Image (cartoon, rainbow, N blue to C red):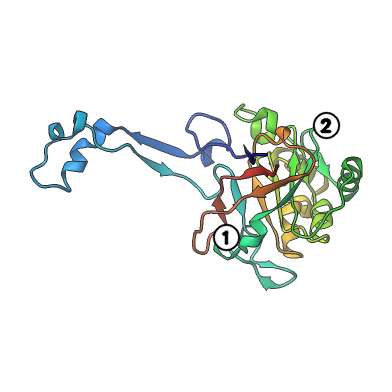
Amino acid sequence: MPRRLVDISIALENDVVADPPPMKPKITYRTHKDTAAEVCLYFPGLKPGDLPDGEGWAIEQVEISTHNGTHLDAPWHFHSTMNKGERAITIDEVPLEWCYQPGVKLDFRAFPDGYVATAKDVEAELARIGHTLKPFEIVVVNTSAGAAYGRPDYVAKGCGMGREATLYLLERGVRVTGTDAWSWDAPFIHTAQRFKETGNAALIWEGHKAGRESGYCHMEKLHNLEALPADGFLVSCFPVKIRGASAGWTRAVAIFEG
């Protein structure tokens, strides 16, 4: 049977809400007509009218963060150290073997916005789908944020993965995870309220900060996870190689064999 590929990435766009306003990407599109004169600069004596249909090349200028779009966060993003004291690795140091492995999907769409998933939640979902985690499997989390992508409230939607839920995965050899929400952790608006009520700073970014104890990567702003089964697929999520960076963009794809 032919191999089936499912795109689980979002596109970089100017007008679709995928980040808070100060963090939005900016894409300037230059058309073939816009660049005809620029092409001529490389070839003395050439005029725009000499080009076929007077057209140059289409090209885009993009102003983005490494955390715009679907991206893979390196341990360096979470903290300066990982594995209880080692220097955290940057995106160009992430082992390629981590980024092409069998996938497992946890369906957490029923959890309310801002809920912080626990180890028991992960254990219960694995039991429901009848899956035993294996080292290096890539675990993706389908939250209610997936259905809200592009809406103004997207960044506030979905549950987050707490410290103990994250460590539950890492203790079983998982090294790459992912979510269709804006963040691996619960949306900031909900965490801010819990911090206000408790004064407990350990609640802030607790899933990310689990990387201090065990180095790992996660993808954020995945898409189309509802199209995936619970398991039986591969995930490819190789990041763009940026020297010393905290993240790299990835065209994440789920691959079904046979």
User: Which mark is on residue 130?
Assistant: none
* Residue 87 percent across, percent down from the top left: 64, 71
Q: Quadrant of residue 183?
A: top right
Question: Which image quarter is the N terminus in?
Answer: top right
Quickly name the residue at label 1.
91
Looking at marks 1 and 2 on the same chain, the residue that comes earlier in the sequence is marked by 1
Q: How many numbered dots are placed on residues in this image?
A: 2
Q: CA distance from mark 1 to mark 2?
A: 32 Å
Of residue 231 and residue 149, the one placed in the foreground of this image is: 231
Which residue occupies 61% across, 45% down? 252
* Residue 166 percent across, percent down from the top left: 79, 53
Which residue occupies 65% across, 61% down? 97
Relative vertical location of residue 100 with respect to residue 224 in this rendering, above or below:
below
* Residue 4 percent across, percent down from the top left: 64, 38
User: Which mark is on residue 110?
Assistant: 2
The reply, left or right, for residue 248 in relation to residue 220 is left
Q: What amino acid is at disc 2?
A: Ala
